[in-house]
Image (tube, helix red, strand yellow):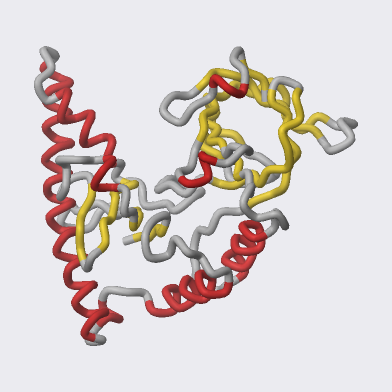
């Protein structure tokens, strides 16, 4: 990757503009050349490591290594795993299990930042509620409720302070952040609801009304789900049991310490 700024100028909040080239390992064949993109740091605990993880956003959808086209991609540094293969094997196993739908595919890449080699990374598909990924976009129930991609995330209450019940929902002792519909859309609509532009104002109010409708339904659904799981009664009405078993096996097999706190994604 090439940017106008150095590695030390990259941070989590804002993207840095740049371009990306992809070639075979011996540089004999260029696979992609001068793709316009933006790059920023990603992660939470991994941000404190010497080797930083990144998120890449292309200006237009790109297919990398034959995977479905998308704008958003992730570069995992795997700094705390000296074998470098734990995340790769977890994704590989999840993709081979029969009862799980979208799971991120990944491939190892050597990364050069402004012609300086910064190490072996794992290029992964971003988990998002879009076509080619966890596709829930524009899928609504007969009574006008959106489909959801939600994340069990203990940081949600800090990230969206004051927006409980809209940007995240609490149930069964867990906080679930809205990834699709995107909670950031609610925050943006709240600001535009007082716009001088009537069209912007009307669109924002429509967005806010839909979020209220969606999150009220989601709160009730998650409460019923939690009650059914804790009581071991009728949980098959709320949970796809076969996919949950496969999900659980991956967490246990790879000893995922985040399973009870963050980075756990569910589709409704």
Of the pair 185 and 62, the residue shown nearer to us: 185
Q: Is 261 left or right of 18, judged from the image as shown?
A: left
Of the pair 53 and 181, the residue shown nearer to us: 53
Q: Quadrant of residue 159?
A: top left
Q: Is 13 left or right of 191, judged from the image as shown?
A: right
x and y percentages locating residue 87 in the rendered image: 61, 57
- The correct choice, above or below, for 189 with respect to 75 in the image is above
Residue at image point 54% right, 18% down: 17
Of the pair 7 and 224, the residue shown nearer to us: 7
Residue at image point 58% right, 22% down: 8
Residue at image point 62% right, 52% down: 80
**Number of marks drawn:** 0
x and y percentages locating residue 163 in the rendered image: 16, 42
- The correct choice, above or below, for 108 with respect to 198 in the image is below
- Quarter of the C terminus within the rendering: bottom left
- The correct choice, above or below, for 46 with respect to 27 in the image is below
Q: Quadrant of residue 20?
A: top right
Residue at image point 22% right, 44% down: 167
x and y percentages locating residue 33 in the rendered image: 72, 24
Q: Is 249 left or right of 151, judged from the image as shown?
A: right
x and y percentages locating residue 68 in the rendered image: 58, 45
- Quarter of the N terminus within the rendering: top right
């Amino acid at each position: 990757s090439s940017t106008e700024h150095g590695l030390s100028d990259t941070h989590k909040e804002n993207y840095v503009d740049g371009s990306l080239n992809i070639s075979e390992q011996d540089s004999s064949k260029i696979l992609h050349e001068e793709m316009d993109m933006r790059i920023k740091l990603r992660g939470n605990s991994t941000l404190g490591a010497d080797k930083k993880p990144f998120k890449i956003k292309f200006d237009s959808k790109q297919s990398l290594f034959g995977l479905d086209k998308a704008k958003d991609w992730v570069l995992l540094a795997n700094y705390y795993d000296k074998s470098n293969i734990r995340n790769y094997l977890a994704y590989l196993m999840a993709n081979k299990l029969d009862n799980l739908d979208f799971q991120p595919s990944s491939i190892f890449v050597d990364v050069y930042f402004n012609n300086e080699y910064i190490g072996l990374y794992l290029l992964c598909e971003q988990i998002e509620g879009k076509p080619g990924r966890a596709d829930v976009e524009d899928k609504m129930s007969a009574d006008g409720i959106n489909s959801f991609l939600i994340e069990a995330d203990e940081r949600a209450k800090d990230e969206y302070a004051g927006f409980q019940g809209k940007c995240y929902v609490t149930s069964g002792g867990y906080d679930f952040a809205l990834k699709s519909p995107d909670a950031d859309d609610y925050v943006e609509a709240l600001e535009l609801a007082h716009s001088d532009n009537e069209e912007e104002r009307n669109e924002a109010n429509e967005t806010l009304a839909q979020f209220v409708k969606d999150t009220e339904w989601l709160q009730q659904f998650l409460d019923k789900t939690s009650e059914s799981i804790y009581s071991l009664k009728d949980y098959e009405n709320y949970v796809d049991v076969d996919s949950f078993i496969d999900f659980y096996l991956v967490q246990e097999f790879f000893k995922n310490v985040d399973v009870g706190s963050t980075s756990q994604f569910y589709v409704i």
